[in-house]
């Protein structure tokens, strides 16, 4: 009993640590304060701004679209790379493994800056094409997709693939019908991680984004000499909305799994039996 | 069973992929439509400071004698409409913003393309010296053109400075059209800080305000303040003040970049670092309003904003200008050669943009929205002075009023009685003062010129040295602890290896 | 058979080409700048300057200190959390895990602004505790990166191992120390790798929390911002080299594990 209390306390403390600032944002998003720290009165105006300001909607959609596109590209690249490298000879896989590690350990400032120099200064690509930005984000995300797919490949029983070939499947069919489904969990988590990284990035975007485009983070960090706080405070509302969506997802999936769990025992047994 | 299970796992991915493909397709759609319409449209790439222009959507109407002014739309949309109505050509402004002169220059060298930018005067000088600027055309200065709002409205005081200051023998005004100007000073909370304390750069190292003062996170701003503080005695001495060449001497002293001065500034800023709340690039205003700090090194325009905001929370702050000297700065428009590329249509649009921003109602809208002071005084148009009067003049029944002459700015004649505001006395060190500093204060202002490459490098290095952590400052116990830690790790590693070997 | 396996190998080509173009090539660009001066001549000056200037060395030390303490704090918070989560009786652990990860979807700059207010409420004047603030901010920002890999390792551990040790007479603490902890080492190493480096370089967190002292990231950034690409590139390379040494060193600890990075998710 005692131990359970301690466990609950630890979890509660960590959750408080993580969520307290977000709750603060939520509270302030419902006031007309222009700075955190000075509450004036209750107001919904941040939410109105959030859903009616064109500039803001562009920025949010742009950020999300960037995250989706770069996550998709990095998932494709990273997955292919992982599958290919896993079945390649030692030299190729070592090369990919090592190079893959560089963006992971490199500072984001450096990654962003060096890609910008290479693409814009050396190759003369216009930033307005969004190409440097997408490449920058893919370079940031793809290695993490790679890293989440590789262990799934290691868990894979190689005999299944061979069996499929023996039964007459072409390599392509065997790959899409056998290998990909087996590693899909790794792909999905890689994709999720890529989205998270892209949404949270600031450094790469500052160096590679076109001048007229802002992601949420470059906007918040760069709003320096600013006198107007309309958009800044509307972003508090945005984070509250994200927070609510998270809560909703958690509740729904909790409900769904507890519903599903009743019939799942059988499958588990089956799975182990292979 | 097995099949069903697999399909179930695969489903969310499929729908996700679909969604993605759709979103990608969607993302290409607007681009295709814009590129089709682009043919006869002029695209004007404008870059300005963050939040340095009216974005519209106001609640309040400015009811001047000459008519009401309100910002309904974004001023850039209004410009596009106005340009089409006036010149019959469509122009599309691709507007972007930067946080500092250095950031702009960095982004410019790293491949961003601009036609018209609004840097401060020293950055403009740097660009001009690198031959990056397109001179303003002759027709821009033609006072007979009714649409040349800039040249008709620019303050004589500002125009005088722009014509007297030169880069390689050419006056600034050839390249540079003023937008906003101001001075640097100290926003302070009179409850804790006396006016006397706030009126010296040495407030930054004043131990009474330890960790309660903020300073700008920028080499040049910090350097100016530090020079002012170091040379405080000289700058405020009678002999120096009464020297007939006071102005030139002041500018020379404030722009002193000799090695000894740089060294002294570095030492001084080190002290500042240990005494101030922070080097801030954004938070200073908010911290002033929420009361985290009691004094804040600020641009006068941001000072107005801070004072206004604090007033809404019933906190009454003041603005002071150090007695040693203050940095007067000008943000203005200049055209980049690499963007304009001798395209007359583009240059015309760029100059029209400057003119539109200098039209008195636009000027008032921008000033109202951002708090800074425009370089435009209005010329024949009385509205800008009316606006100042609307903002600051005392109510009829107010008793404690002061006459505040602004002739120096509006007509070039300091004694001009047409341009005097009867303001509540407390405004003399509050918003009115930071919006339009009085002539006496302006007389001790100095521009900070652009330093050559070598000097800039020295200053940057000095700044990095200030901000870095000197290895000699690490206390002994940390060295010992680190040593022990490393030794411990090594020992453990060795032991583990030995265990493995046996 | 040979033909079939060949086609699988080919899948690696796009990614290998991509890595070559956008990871290896930029690295060479950096090297070019690091070993030249403003006039484009080959020089070692940037390198020697870094190791002779007490300020840059001090900054290196300071960032290592921040990164070390941050990583330690993250570990101390994340390990119990991950352990409790992985061993909980909850029906849906992955959803619970999501609760810890999802805050990342709200941009760090927004979260840190809010954290700042909480801190100033607790501490009063923030400026008196710059180091502490940096640690709290970084820990806050990077904690999910530590929880995730540790959780993923622990949850995969075979519970029968711990049971067996208990059967053989170990008490709960001993069995944790001898069985669970060593086996979860890959997760810890992966988490450390995810936290340590960003903690040395994410200077925006420091800026927002009023720590006016530079760390490696801000040093590199300020060189780039001051148009000194040569000095910045050199420091970036030095940092990369240091991190590589660290990685090799930590690999030595967890060498038996193959899928190191893989425990991320």
Image (spheres, helix red, strand yellow):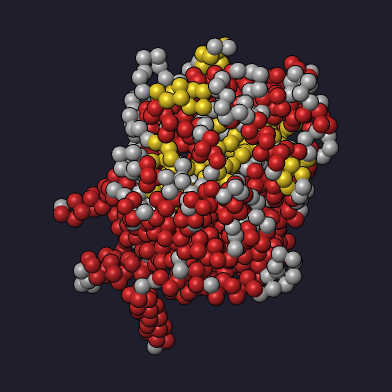
Depth check: A266 or C9 in front? C9
Q: Which quarter of the picture shows residue B13?
A: top right
Q: Residue at x 60, y 63 (%)?
A: B258
A167 relative to A255 in the view: left or right: right
Looking at the image, which residue is at 34% across and 43% down?
Answer: B194
The quadrant in which residue A160 appears is bottom right
Q: Quadrant of the C terminus of chain B?
A: bottom left
Residue C161, relative to residue A122: is it above or below? below
Tally of numbered discs? 0
Q: Looking at the image, which is closer to me, B251 or C24?
A: B251
Say which residue appears at 50% left-offset and 72% top-offset: C54
Q: Identify which residue is drawn at 40% across, 70% down.
A: B473
The residue lying toward the viewer, choosing from C167 and C30, is C30
List x then y, in percent, for residue B114.
71, 40
Q: Left or right: where does residue C136 sit relative to residue B389?
A: left
A28 vs B261, left or right, is left
Where is residue C47? Give x, y as percent. 61, 73
């Amino acid at each position: 009993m005692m131990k359970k209390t301690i466990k609950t306390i630890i979890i509660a403390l960590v959750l408080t640590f993580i969520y307290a600032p977000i709750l603060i944002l939520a509270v302030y998003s419902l006031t007309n304060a222009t700075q955190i720290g000075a509450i004036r009165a209750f107001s919904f105006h941040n939410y109105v701004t959030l859903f009616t300001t064109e500039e803001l909607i562009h920025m949010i959609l742009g950020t999300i679209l960037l995250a989706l596109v770069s996550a998709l590209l990095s998932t494709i690249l990273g997955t292919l790379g992982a599958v290919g490298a896993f079945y390649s000879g030692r030299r190729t896989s070592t090369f990919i493994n090592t190079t893959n590690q560089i963006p992971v350990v490199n500072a984001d400032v450096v990654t962003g800056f060096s890609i910008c120099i290479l693409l814009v200064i050396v190759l003369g690509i216009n930033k307005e094409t969004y190409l440097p930005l997408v490449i920058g984000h893919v370079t940031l995300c793809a290695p993490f997709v790679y890293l989440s797919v590789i262990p799934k490949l290691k868990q894979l029983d190689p005999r299944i693939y061979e069996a499929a070939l023996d039964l007459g499947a072409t390599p392509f069919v065997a790959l899409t019908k056998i290998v990909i489904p087996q590693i899909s969990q790794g792909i999905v988590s890689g994709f999720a991680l890529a989205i998270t990284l892209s949404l949270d990035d600031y450094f790469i975007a500052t160096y590679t984004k076109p001048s007229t485009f802002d992601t949420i983070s470059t906007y918040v960090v760069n709003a320096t000499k600013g006198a107007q706080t309309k958009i800044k405070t509307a972003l508090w509302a945005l984070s509250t909305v994200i927070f609510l969506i998270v809560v909703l997802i958690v509740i729904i999936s909790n409900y769904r799994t507890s519903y599903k769990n009743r019939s799942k025992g059988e499958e588990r047994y089956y799975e182990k039996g292979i | 069973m097995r099949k069903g299970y697999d399909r179930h796992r695969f489903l969310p991915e499929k729908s996700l992929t679909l969604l993605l493909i759709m979103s990608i397709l969607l993302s290409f759609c607007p681009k295709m439509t814009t590129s089709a319409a682009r043919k006869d449209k002029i695209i004007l790439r404008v870059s300005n400071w963050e939040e340095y222009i009216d974005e519209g959507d106001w609640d309040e109407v400015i009811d001047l004698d000459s008519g009401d002014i309100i910002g309904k739309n974004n001023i850039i949309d209004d410009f596009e409409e106005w340009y089409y109505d006036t010149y019959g050509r469509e122009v599309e402004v691709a507007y972007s913003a930067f946080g500092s002169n250095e950031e702009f220059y960095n982004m410019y060298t790293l491949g961003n393309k601009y036609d018209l930018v609004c840097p401060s005067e020293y950055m403009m000088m740097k660009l001009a010296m690198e031959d990056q600027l397109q001179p303003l055309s002759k027709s821009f200065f033609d006072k007979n053109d009714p649409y040349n709002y800039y040249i008709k409205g620019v303050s004589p005081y500002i125009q005088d400075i722009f014509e007297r200051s030169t880069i390689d023998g050419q006056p600034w005004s050839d390249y540079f059209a003023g937008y906003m100007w101001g001075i640097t000073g100290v926003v302070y909370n009179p409850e804790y800080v006396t006016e006397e304390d706030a009126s010296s750069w040495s407030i930054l190292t004043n131990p009474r305000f330890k960790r309660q003062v903020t300073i700008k996170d920028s080499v040049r701003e910090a350097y100016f303040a530090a020079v002012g503080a170091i040379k405080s005695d000289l700058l405020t001495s009678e002999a120096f003040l009464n020297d007939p060449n006071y102005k030139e001497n002041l500018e020379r002293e404030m722009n002193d970049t000799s090695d000894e001065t740089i060294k002294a500034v570095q030492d001084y800023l080190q002290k500042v670092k240990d005494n101030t709340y922070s080097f801030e690039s954004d938070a200073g205003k908010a911290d002033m309003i929420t009361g985290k700090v009691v004094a804040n090194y600020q641009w006068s325009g941001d000072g107005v904003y801070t004072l206004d905001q604090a007033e809404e929370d019933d906190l009454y702050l003041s603005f002071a200008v150090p007695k040693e000297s203050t940095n007067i700065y000008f943000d203005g428009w200049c055209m980049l050669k690499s963007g304009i590329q001798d395209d007359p249509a583009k240059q015309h649009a760029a100059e029209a943009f400057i003119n539109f921003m200098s039209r008195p109602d636009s000027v008032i809208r921008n000033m109202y929205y951002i708090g800074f002071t425009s370089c435009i005084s209005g010329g024949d148009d009385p509205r800008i002075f009316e606006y100042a009067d609307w903002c600051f003049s005392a109510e009829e029944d107010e008793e404690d009023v002061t006459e505040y002459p602004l002739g120096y700015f509006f007509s070039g004649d300091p004694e001009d009685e047409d341009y005097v505001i009867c303001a509540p006395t407390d405004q003399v060190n509050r918003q009115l003062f930071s919006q339009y500093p009085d002539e006496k204060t302006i007389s001790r202002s100095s521009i900070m010129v652009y330093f050559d490459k070598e000097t800039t490098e020295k200053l940057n290095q000095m700044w990095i040295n200030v901000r870095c952590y000197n290895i000699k400052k690490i206390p002994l116990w940390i060295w010992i602890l680190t040593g022990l830690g490393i030794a411990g790790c090594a020992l453990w590693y060795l032991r583990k290896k030995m265990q493995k070997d046996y | 058979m040979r033909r079939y396996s060949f086609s699988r190998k080919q899948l690696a080509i796009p990614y290998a080409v991509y890595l070559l173009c956008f990871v290896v090539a930029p690295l060479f660009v950096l090297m070019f700048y690091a070993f030249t001066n403003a006039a484009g001549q080959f020089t070692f000056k940037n390198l020697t300057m870094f190791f002779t200037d007490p300020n840059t060395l001090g900054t290196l030390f300071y960032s290592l200190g921040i990164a070390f303490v941050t990583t330690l704090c993250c570990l101390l918070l994340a390990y119990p959390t991950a352990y409790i989560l992985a061993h909980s009786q909850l029906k849906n652990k992955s959803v619970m895990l999501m609760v810890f990860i999802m805050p990342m979807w709200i941009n760090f700059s927004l979260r840190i602004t809010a954290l700042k207010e909480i801190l100033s409420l607790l501490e009063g004047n923030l400026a008196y505790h710059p180091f502490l603030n940096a640690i709290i901010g970084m820990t806050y920002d990077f904690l999910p990166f530590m929880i995730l890999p540790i959780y993923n390792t622990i949850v995969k551990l075979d519970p029968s191992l711990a049971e067996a040790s208990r059967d053989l007479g170990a008490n709960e603490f001993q069995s944790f120390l001898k069985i669970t902890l060593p086996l979860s080492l890959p997760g810890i190493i992966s988490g450390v790798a995810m936290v340590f480096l960003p903690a040395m370089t994410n200077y925006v967190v420091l800026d927002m929390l009023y720590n006016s002292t530079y760390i490696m990231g801000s040093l590199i950034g300020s060189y780039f911002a001051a148009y000194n690409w040569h000095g910045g590139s050199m420091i970036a390379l030095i940092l990369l080299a240091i991190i590589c040494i660290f990685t090799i060193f930590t690999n030595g600890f967890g060498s038996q594990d193959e899928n190191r990075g893989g425990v991320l998710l």
